[in-house]
Amino acid sequence: MVRIGITGHSNLARESVPLVAAELRKVLSEYATPLIGVSCLARGADQVFARVVLELGGDLEVVLPAADYRERKVKPDNRTEFEELLGRAASVRVLPFDTSNRDAYAAANEDVLGGVDALIGVWDGAPPDGKGGTGDTVQAARTRGVPVVVVWPDGAQRSQ
């Protein structure tokens, strides 16, 4: 089994979602099956990745950063999609943090990196902006020798 992790921007512009999904399909189809996708299931890139993994017949493992993640961080306009993907996960781990914060996100990214064969970064290449972000996670993976595939298709944008 091949285990692929995801890190990526949560603020993908709506019109970027199909572009990112198409690129993820292409990248993930190059890996051997069965495929396991490991995601924190944040809105944006993580959820697009989760959908593509499931669409390709893979299993989804979810790592939630903290006990309050669902209640505190999942916005009402994203709750249905989050809950549907969470319900389709083969496994869900909740890290031992009470509160969702940068430390919890950094720990969740560490957890993902510690158990994958490769990482996909849906990343526009912007410098890291703090502990637990996309740029930090890509850098950490590279430092550890975890293979990284950066996905940022032409035309992709982040919303403001």
Image: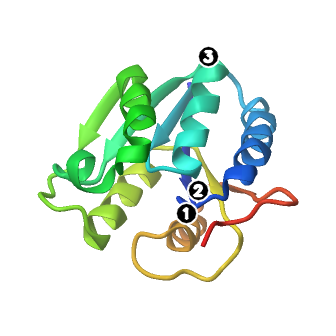
Amino acid at dot 1? Ala
Q: Which residue is mark 1?
A: 141
Q: Which residue is mark 2?
A: 146
Task: Using the image, determine if residue 77 lies above or below residue 87.
Answer: below
Amino acid at dot 2? Val
Disc 3 vs disc 2: which is toward the camera?
Answer: 3
Give how far apart the Cα atoms at labels 1 and 2 are: 5 Å
Q: Is residue 143 left or right of residue 132?
A: right
Which of the image's four quarters has the C terminus? bottom right
Can you give x and y, in whole percent of width and height, for residue 155 in the image?
85, 60
User: Residue visible at 40% across and 37% down?
Assistant: 82
**Label 1 packing within 10 angstroms: few (<14), some (14-19), many (20+):** many
User: Residue visible at 23% across and 55% down?
Assistant: 72
Disc 3 vs disc 1: which is toward the camera?
Answer: 3
SS for dot 3: loop
User: Residue visible at 70% across and 74% down?
Assistant: 125
Whichever of labels 3 and 1 marks the residue nearer the N terminus, that label is 3
Give how far apart the Cα atoms at labels 3 and 1 are: 26 Å
Label pair 1/2, CB-CB below 8 angstroms: yes
Can you see residue 40? no
Task: Using the image, determine if residue 91 lies above or below residue 133.
Answer: above
Q: Which residue is mark 3?
A: 57
Q: Tell how many labels.
A: 3
Label pair 3/1, CB-CB below 8 angstroms: no
